Image: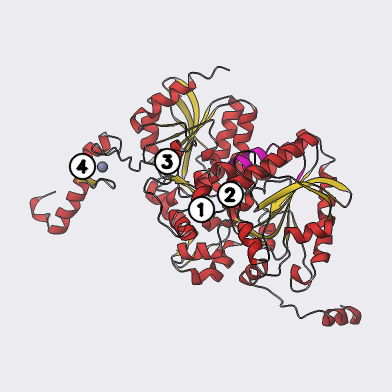
């Protein structure tokens, strides 16, 4: 950019792009360093949001990922309108913004040589909410794993069910779990990776059903929202409530794994699968 | 319509036609609306209540046991609301904790062992949103039920009798046949909760109720429920015995049809039923 266009607003903008402010320790980290560190704070190890495509690059052997079921996108079957407008406008804007069709990307590929089927949720798309299209893709990927006898991995990042689809979204919880049940019956491994956040209807369905549940450090994981619980019990909750560490302590996740170690961790676990 | 039936209509209490979804929400939560125990007293013979999840407690918000409905032996499980204040406190207003969902699953597995059909009655504002519920794994307990119910080898008939509150309802709601009373509701979130998030104000709950498609009629149109049981008069509270009768008939009819299927057919059909739920766009 030429020096003469460098107004105050431009300066602010370029400063914002140059630095990332960590949401946890509030340190300013060079964007380049932040990205090189996989959107993880180099100072406090806060695991920031990461897109499905960055996640794929991180987890799969180079060039091995093949996307499946990308022809599915949302539908405004209830013609849902709130004060801010229609659900249709909302998801169309999200498709444009993110370049993906739904809140999950599904496909197959290799991790350190091990073939797997994977569903990677993307929080940027309507808060990773579980809609009919999301559930359909997660089920179809499970069915693909079932048909091809491949291990299945789901990486969750979701605020829960997608309200704008009413009970249709609620039923995705049962639908995805029906897919998991079939994998269980056939002794096909299913690993769930719970990232920040995994809450509501997603935590209360496939995300908690892993044969192995893994989480990233500090991830928010829980069924009911903190505010609702505080209103119910009339007191403040401890700071670590519903964190990955809290869940590990209470026996609901097997391990907390740093983002940079996730690929090796998953392929290492799957090396014990012997069928 | 002939004169006779006109006269019959006039004799009945005045029924408001074209109820709005918000009206139906009110009826589903009516303080006099029949609860599980009312229906049990009318239709269940020899109720052998079974207690406890074998892990932590006996959740009184969820009850179950063997019983006979119209001569048919079943495992009956349901959310247990109360009517009087002390009942509601003891039963936590029908909001089950993980212990309740785990008890329900234990009884469903027992039904499978005994080869007895399962009937569930759904009536809850939602799963309990409390500290100890989270601590003991509310999410895991519900998720486990959804997964295990998908492969239960006996017929499962679910009846939504009042409030079908989100995951807390679905936690005992994965069945081969889903029946619903005409003034019951079933929703992904309460209208108040939805309004306070999407409208930023709970006072828009009537708008949210409309938008959420939470009535039996709407859910039937969307393929989420299989059958609507019409309530008489102004709602089930005006004639609980009659409603019990209608529910009993519907349960028996559906169990009978399901018992004709082999276990493999039953499981395949249940899988297909839930696989087909939801609507999305398929792009070329
Ligand atoms: Zn930091």
Q: Is mark 4 within 8 Å of ligand 1?
A: yes
Residue indicated by mark 2: B97
Cα distance between the residues tagged 2 and 1: 8 Å
The one nearer the camera, A40 or B135, is B135
Q: Nearer the viewer, mark 4 or mark 1?
A: 1
Residue B10's place in the image compared with B120, above or below, is: below
For residue A168, side relative to residue A162 (left or right): right
For residue A158, side relative to residue B72 (left or right): left
Residue A183 seen by the camera: yes
Q: Nearer the viewer, mark 2 or mark 4?
A: 2
User: Residue at position x 72%, y 76% from top?
Assistant: B17
Tags 2 and 4 on a common chain: no
Residue indicated by mark 1: B130
Which class describes the residues within 10 Å of circle 3: few (<14), some (14-19), or many (20+)? some
Q: Nearer the viewer, mark 3 or mark 4?
A: 3
Cα distance between the residues tagged 3 and 4: 28 Å
User: Residue at position x 35%, y 43% from top?
Assistant: A49
Report x, y in % for residue B269. Answer: 73, 40
User: Residue at position x 41%, y 55% from top?
Assistant: A93
Q: Are marks 4 and 1 in contact (CB under 8 Å)?
A: no
For residue B159, side relative to residue A201 (left or right): right
Picture disc at residue A29: 4
Rendered image quadrant of residue B37: bottom right
Tags 3 and 1 on a common chain: no
């Amino acid at each position: 950019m030429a020096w003469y266009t460098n107004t105050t607003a431009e300066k602010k903008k370029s400063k914002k792009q140059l630095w990332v402010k960590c949401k946890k320790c509030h340190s300013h980290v060079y964007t380049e360093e932040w990205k090189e560190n996989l959107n993880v704070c180099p100072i406090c190890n806060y695991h920031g949001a990461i897109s499905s495509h960055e996640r794929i690059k991180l987890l799969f052997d180079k060039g091995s990922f093949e996307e499946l079921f990308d022809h599915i996108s949302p539908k405004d079957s209830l013609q849902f309108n709130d004060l801010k407008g229609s659900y249709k406008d909302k998801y169309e804007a999200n498709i444009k913004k993110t370049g993906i069709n739904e809140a999950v990307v599904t496909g197959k590929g290799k991790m350190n040589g091990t073939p797997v089927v994977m569903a990677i949720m993307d929080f940027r798309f309507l808060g990773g909410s579980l809609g009919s299209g999301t559930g359909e893709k997660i089920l179809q990927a499970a069915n693909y794993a079932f048909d091809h006898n491949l291990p299945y991995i789901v990486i969750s990042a979701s605020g829960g069910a997608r309200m704008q689809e009413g009970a249709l979204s609620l039923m995705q919880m049962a639908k995805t779990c029906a897919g998991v049940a079939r994998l269980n019956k056939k002794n096909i491994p299913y690993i769930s990776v719970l990232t920040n956040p995994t809450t509501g209807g997603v935590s209360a369905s496939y995300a908690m059903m892993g044969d192995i549940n893994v989480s990233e450090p500090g991830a928010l994981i829980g069924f009911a929202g903190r505010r609702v619980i505080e209103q119910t019990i009339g007191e403040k909750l401890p700071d670590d409530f519903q964190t990955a560490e809290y869940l590990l302590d209470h026996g609901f996740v097997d391990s907390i794994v740093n983002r940079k170690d996730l690929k090796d961790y998953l392929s290492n676990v799957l090396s014990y699968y012997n069928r | 319509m002939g004169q006779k039936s006109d006269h019959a209509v006039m004799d009945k209490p005045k029924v408001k036609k074209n109820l709005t979804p918000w009206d139906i929400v009110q009826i589903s939560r009516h303080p006099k609306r029949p609860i599980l125990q009312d229906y049990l007293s009318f239709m269940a013979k020899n109720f052998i209540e079974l207690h406890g999840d074998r892990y932590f407690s006996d959740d009184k918000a969820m009850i179950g046991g063997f019983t006979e409905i119209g001569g048919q032996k079943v495992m009956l499980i349901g959310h247990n609301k109360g009517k009087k204040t002390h009942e509601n406190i003891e039963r936590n207003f029908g909001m089950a904790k993980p212990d309740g969902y785990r008890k329900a699953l234990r009884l469903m597995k027992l039904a499978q062992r005994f080869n007895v059909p399962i009937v569930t009655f759904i009536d809850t504002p939602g799963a309990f949103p409390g500290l100890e519920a989270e601590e003991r794994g509310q999410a895991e307990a519900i998720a486990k039920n959804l997964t295990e119910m998908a492969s239960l080898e006996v017929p499962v008939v679910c009846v939504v009798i009042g409030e079908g509150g989100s995951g807390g309802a679905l936690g005992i709601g994965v069945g081969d046949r889903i029946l619903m009373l005409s003034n019951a509701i079933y929703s992904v979130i309460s209208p108040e909760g939805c309004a306070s998030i999407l409208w930023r104000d709970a006072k828009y709950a009537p708008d949210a109720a409309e938008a959420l498609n939470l009535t039996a009629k709407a859910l039937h149109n969307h393929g989420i429920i299989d059958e609507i049981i019409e309530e008489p008069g102004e709602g089930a509270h005006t004639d609980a015995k009659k409603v019990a009768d209608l529910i009993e008939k519907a349960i028996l009819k559906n169990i009978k049809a399901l018992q004709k299927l082999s276990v493999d057919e039953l499981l395949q059909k249940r899988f297909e039923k839930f696989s087909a739920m939801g609507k999305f766009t398929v792009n070329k």
